[in-house]
Image: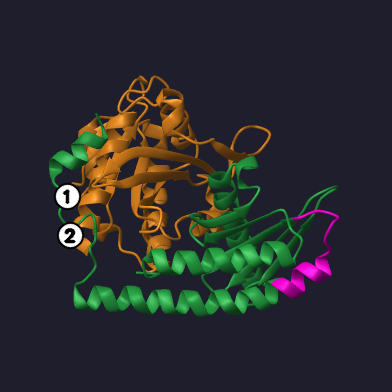
Chain colours: A orange, B green
Amino acid sequence: MSFINYASREINCKIVYYGPGLCGKTTNLQYVYQKTAPEAKGKMISLATETERTLFFDFLPLALGEIRGFKTRFHLYTVPGQVFYDASRKLILKGVDGVVFVADSQEERMDANVESLDNLRINLNEQGYDLDKLPYVVQYNKRDLPTAVTVDELRRELNPTGVPEFEACATTGEGVFETLKAVAKLILIDLKKGR
Amino acid sequence: MADPQLVMYDEEFKQIQAVIEKLLREANSKVIFLVDKNGQLIAGVGEVERFDTTSLASLTAGNIAATGGLAKLIGEKEFSILFHEGEKDNLHISIVGGRVILVVLFDNRSSLGLVRLRVKKASDELTTIFVKLMEKAEERERSGDTDFPFAEITDDDIDNLFR
């Protein structure tokens, strides 16, 4: 849940990037980090293995600016995508305000996408959240690869509820900020009507 | 939802600040942080400018979450105190009132025993303040008197953030 601090006039929100292993969650955060002005970002932390697979999480704090005199901060987290790190994924979802599901567009990763999305729903339910009630967007990543399936097909499998969706290529940055803006906006709208 | 929203007001913030400042002196420590279990920094005193406080808060919360997971695996509710010993500096991390994390950084000018003793006393005071804070937030929400800054934001306000 977001943290509203009237003493320092700040509001903090938590965004989690979820998705199967190697779908590009960390790459999303790295691109945001590279392209953000130094004064608007903190240090990016990656708790990764020696082979640069996410072990626990990546963390990137962003300060977007002020709304009505309140500093608006977003804390971006990724989860480890590999199936056997499920216990860690559950922990990172605690206190989440918005979710980005990063799907791997390659045909051979379709099953992994579906499994990860099911896992997201289950883990959110365990924490008392409902994905359909959370600010939530889907990103179809790796659109540049020749083995990418059509967006129609991805949508049918991964976005039956029709939440905002974005095509992306996280390595070049295409679609990365569009995705982040969309989820941040949904969170702020949610905060506005939730009170 | 899993946890109620954490809200901080000026009055309680000053009380919290006073308690941890006293703890800083009495425990002979270098820095003290209070962190929400979700990884948001609530307050800090001492040599805070020497540290990347945002990262520290997020990693502390991750640490508490991971050891909490371990505790559940062996049938414990949680591990309420963690201690990390370094060559020069040490970290004493404890859970206060089930919801916030108190982090005390100290070196050889203090000792684990002293820190534990002082933390125990300060924890009770902090718990009282946080209980009051939660009650106040709930009461304000019920009465509709939230002066919530986001209630009247417009789409333009949101779009402006991303210019």
Label 1 crowd (10 A; few <14 / some 14-19 / many >=20): some
Residue B9 screen position, x and y as percent = 38, 65
Q: Is residue A43 magenta?
A: no
- Chain of the residue displaying label 1: B
- Chain of the residue displaying label 2: A
Residue at left 33%, top 73%?
A: B137
Circle 1 SS class: loop
Q: Say if B6 sits above or below A149 in the image.
A: below
Q: Is residue B111 magenta?
A: yes
Say which of marks 1 and 2 sits in front.
1
* Figure quadrant of the N terminus of chain A: bottom left
Say what amino acid the circle numbered 2 marks: Lys
Q: Find disc 1 in the rendering and name its residue.
A: B153
A110 relative to A190 in the view: left or right:
right
A20 relative to B55 in the view: left or right:
left
* Magenta extent: B106-118
Residue B148 screen position, x and y as percent = 24, 61
Numbered circle sitting on residue B9: none
Residue A116 screen position, x and y as percent = 42, 49
Q: Find disc 2 in the rendering and name its residue.
A: A193
Residue B83: image quadrant is bottom right
